[in-house]
Each structure stands twice: as C-alpha cells, then as structure tokens.
Amino acid sequence: MQHHLTLGPTKGGLRYHPDVTLGEVAALAMWMSWKCALAGLPYGGAKGGITCDPSKLSRNEIERITRRYTQEMIPFIGPQVDVMAPDVGTNEQTMAWMMDTYSMHIGHTVPSIVTGKPVGLGGSLGRREATGRGAAYLINRAADAIKLDLSKCTAVVQGFGNVGSITTYSLGRYGAKVIAVSDVQGGIYNAKGLDLLALEKYAAQNQSIVGFPGGGTHQQRGTAFVAMRYFGACRAGTANHGCQRRQNPMSHPRRGGERPDHAGRG
C-alpha cells in the first residue's frame, strides 16, 4: 500500500501476521507519510503485509512466501519508487531474500531496494537495535522534562522482540527497574526487578521469556501488568489489556495503532 509519493519514494515496513488486514496496512502507510513529513525526510508513506503466522511456518516456507511476494511486487517497488523494511514478523533475513529476488530480476545487486538488511549485504550497523534504543532515549528525555528520576521508577515493557528487548535493556542502563515484560507466549513479573543480563541469555536460548527462573509470576498470553510507574508498549498501541491498576505517569507506545497481540512479534 503506497499512500503518498509526492515527497519522494515511499518507505515502510513489511509485516507477517495472521491478523493483517488491508485497512490496517492502509492506516500504517498513511502514518508513515506523516512521520516522514514531520521528520523532514524526503519519503512518502507505504506499508505491506502478508496474512500468515511465521511462527507456524518453516524457514523454507517463509523464504518461498517472501520471494513470491517480492516477485509480484516488482512492478511497484524500486529504490526510487518504494523501499521496504522489516516490521512485525519479518527481520534481516526477510530483507535479504527480498533484495536477492529483486536483484536477480534487475540483473545486478540492488542493496537500496530494502533497509534493515544484514550488514554483510550493505546494511547499517546498529539498525536492528535503533528503534528500541530510540524509544528508551525518548523515555529518558521525557523523564528529564517532567523531572522524573528513572532510577527511582519501575518499568513494564509489553513486547520482547527486536524492539521490546532492546528497549528493556536500554531502560535498565538508564537506571529504571524493569519489573515485568511479556511476549506472544506470556509474561514474567518480579516486584524486586528482573535480572536483565540473565533474561537476555535465557531469551536467546529459549526463544521466549516464559519460564525465566528470575520471574516471580508467569502470566498468560494477553495479560498486562500492574503497579508500574512507566509502561512501554513495543508493537502495541493499547496498554490496558487485562490490567487491573495503572499508576504510570508516562506511557510510550513504540508504534501507534497496533493491537496488544502484536507485542513481541518484532
């Protein structure tokens, strides 16, 4: 979906999720136009999506879906037309497959057809971590503006994918005590604070945070947490799903307009 091409080539992410709809993609494409315009970037807004559940597909199946999608999109994309990026359910590997498929059609390597590709293929260092770090940076700046000492705050992050995990670690480095996090399989809570270093290792080994021994309470999927002074929704636009009490003076949805069940997908 391409929303606005006046300022330059369109720019937006590609998502794989079972609940992707045309209306959602159209809205996100429009918001990309706004974001690029507000940031003064010479891009229009675009968005793409495939209705599928990548967690239930093999690597080969995801590759075939990606390459066929790219092949069908070739008349509508290009470095000066539409540049894609990873989003919910997609990653650097997805972008590598898209770049390769497009390049084979053109006849030479075209790294600029996508962003978010592996560094070895011309990607940018720190790109994968940039969104999560940016969210935490803005939280820190906002806390300074309202005279809030993050070292005296507790934090909850909904979503523990590429964005949520980096946001969590970054908040910890800013001094916040992260007491709860969640992903698509469930969540963990510890009022004394989570051991983020141990959590990072556990999540890498188990592909989920559920079962983390340092989490005192294991919540079911779709449950948010209570008694926090800061809430960060990474990939989710609403925060009250299953909540009983909220005391947070500051809330930071990493992306707007997305449902809580998207949290942790990317």
Image (spheres, rainbow, N blue to C red):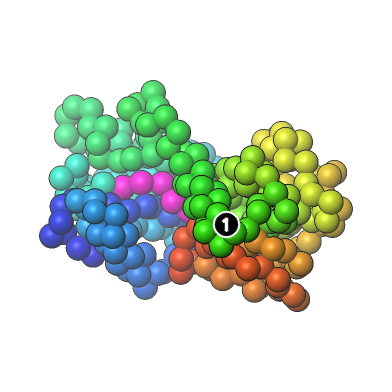
**Residue at image coords 63%, 62%:** 231
Q: Quadrant of the N terminus?
A: bottom left
Q: Is residue 241 above or below residue 124?
A: below
Is 213 colored magenta in this rendering? no
Q: Kindly state the secondary structure of the residue where label 1 is placed.
A: helix
Relative side of 203 to 11, left or right: right
Farthest-out residue, top = 120
Residue 234 in sight: no
Relative side of 96 to 130, left or right: left
Which region shows up in magenta?
A: 84-90
The residue carrying pointer 1 sits among few (fewer than 14), some (14 to 19) or many (20 or more) residues within 10 Å by Cα, namely some
x and y, in percent, of residue 128 in the image: 47, 39
**Residue at image coords 37%, 52%:** 13
| Frontmost residue, 121 versus 140 | 140
x and y, in percent, of residue 59 in the image: 51, 39
x and y, in percent, of residue 174 in the image: 62, 44
**Residue at image coords 61%, 55%:** 159
Is 87 colored magenta in this rendering? yes
x and y, in percent, of residue 12 in the image: 32, 53
For disc 1, the marked residue is 143
Q: Is residue 42 above or below residue 23?
A: above
Q: Name the kind of residue labelled 1 in the image.
A: Ala
Relative side of 35 to 61, left or right: left
Q: Residue 249 occupies which quadrant of the picture?
A: bottom right
Number of marks in the rendered image: 1
| Frontmost residue, 65 versus 235 | 235
